[in-house]
Image (cartoon, rainbow, N blue to C red):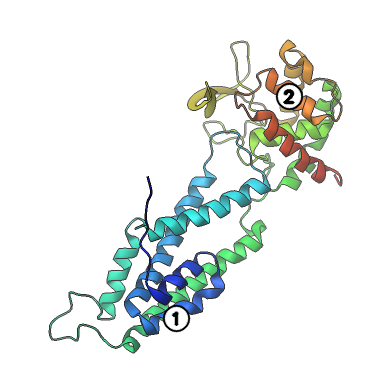
Amino acid sequence: MSVSFPTLPNDASTASQRLAVDPGQTAALQVAARKDPQAAIKAAAQQFESLFMGTLLKTMRETSFDGEEDSNAMGTYRGMLDQQLLQTMSKSGGVGLADVLSRQLAHAAQLDNDASPTVERLAPASSMLPMVNQAIRAYQTIQSKAAAGLTNPASEAPSPTTGAVGGTAESFVTSLLPHARDAAQQLGVAPELVLAHAALESGWGKRSIKTADGKESHNLFGIKAGANWQGDSVDVLTTEYVNGNAVKKIDKFRAYASYSEAFADYAKLLSGSSRYQSALNQGGDMLAFARGLQSGGYATDPHYAQKLVGVMGAVSQRSRGA
């Protein structure tokens, strides 16, 4: 089933397409406004709607319930995909915001079809240029702020706080490396492999499990609280794969008093279970360790080992100077 999308005529259409991928082309919309004011208003309105929809999509991306891969490469891919999605959605009608804004701008510039018969139906292009230029300048301001945030991600990244390690990937590695070394020694593997496992399960600490009152559970490994667990636990909405299908369910996960306690329990779990024996004593062999965890059923994701190996490479680079 094919879907066709309406396009704006001539220069306004070209400017609209460029604006979605190249902020430097906003001047083209000002030129288009002199040639086709009505189309230029529509193009400007679409840009505002794209910004609004982008905010909604960004909020959605920040909400995660599972341990999906959180690498820089995946983030770049998702950003490109979201940008293209927003452009397509906006041109196919969006959520209606662009239409409302177009009518308001056209009415203010006396270009709407409901104008009084005593008023000239189509005013000269010069009469509405200030309206379009004002809209474009506002868009440029918002766009420049967004670009500044992309070139300086640290300005929006959450700062590391007491009991949290999700500030940056570097702070995650530096803060937890001592605990990882203790656990790795007991498991017979490199500390980087243990850190990578924690990074994958917690999204580099940004998706850490919280208690009902918002406190940190320190459970970076996504260890569930089974029937034999005597400590504290937290109810969490998670994703399980059943017959290849992702299913959302609520499970109980262990809660610890500190990260040191969490790493110690992780090492105890792996070393004391016959299911994970093939993952032990693998030294720096990341593939053998990852396959051992997946074959032991640590996670139901069929691509778990592949994702873990990808994170291990990133951890190894960041741990060299730690």
The reply to whether residue 130 is in sight is no
Screen quadrant of the N terminus:
top left
In this rendering, position of residue 198 left or right of residue 193: left
On screen, residue 297 versus residue 42, left or right, reads: right
Q: Position of residue 220 (x, y in %)?
A: 67, 32
Above or below, 210 relative to 70: above
First in residue order: circle 2 vs circle 1: 1
Give the structural element (helix, strand or loop) at label 1.
helix
Residue 184 horizontal/vertical position (percent): 83, 27
Going by the numbered disc 2, the residue's amino acid type is: Arg
* Location of residue 261 with respect to 54 vertically, above or below: above
Name the residue rendered at 46%, 73% in the picture.
Answer: 15
Task: Name the residue at 76% across, 47% down.
Answer: 170
- Answer above or below: position of 310 versus 27: above
Q: Where is residue 315 in the image (x, y as percent from the top left)?
A: 77, 41
The quadrant of the picture occupied by the C terminus is top right
Query: For this rendering, which residue is in front, 311 or 257?
Result: 311
Marks 2/1: CA–CA distance: 57 Å
Tag 1 residue: 30
Residue nearer the viewer, 89 or 189: 89
From the viewer's perspective, tell me whether residue 187 is left or right of residue 49. right
Q: Name the residue under label 2.
A: 291
Q: Which residue is drawn at 74% across and 21% down?
A: 292
Task: Determine if residue 228 is in view.
Answer: yes
Label 2: how many Cα within 10 Å (few below 14, some 14–19, many 20+)? some
Name the secondary structure under disc 2.
helix
Name the quadrant containing residue 201: top right
The residue lying furthest to the left in this view is 117
Total number of numbered discs in the rendering: 2
Name the kind of residue labelled 1 in the image: Gln
Q: Where is residue 206 in the image (x, y as percent from the top left)?
A: 63, 42
- Structural crowding at the residue carrying mark 1, measured as other residues with C-alpha within 10 Å and reported as few (<14), some (14–19) or many (≥20): many
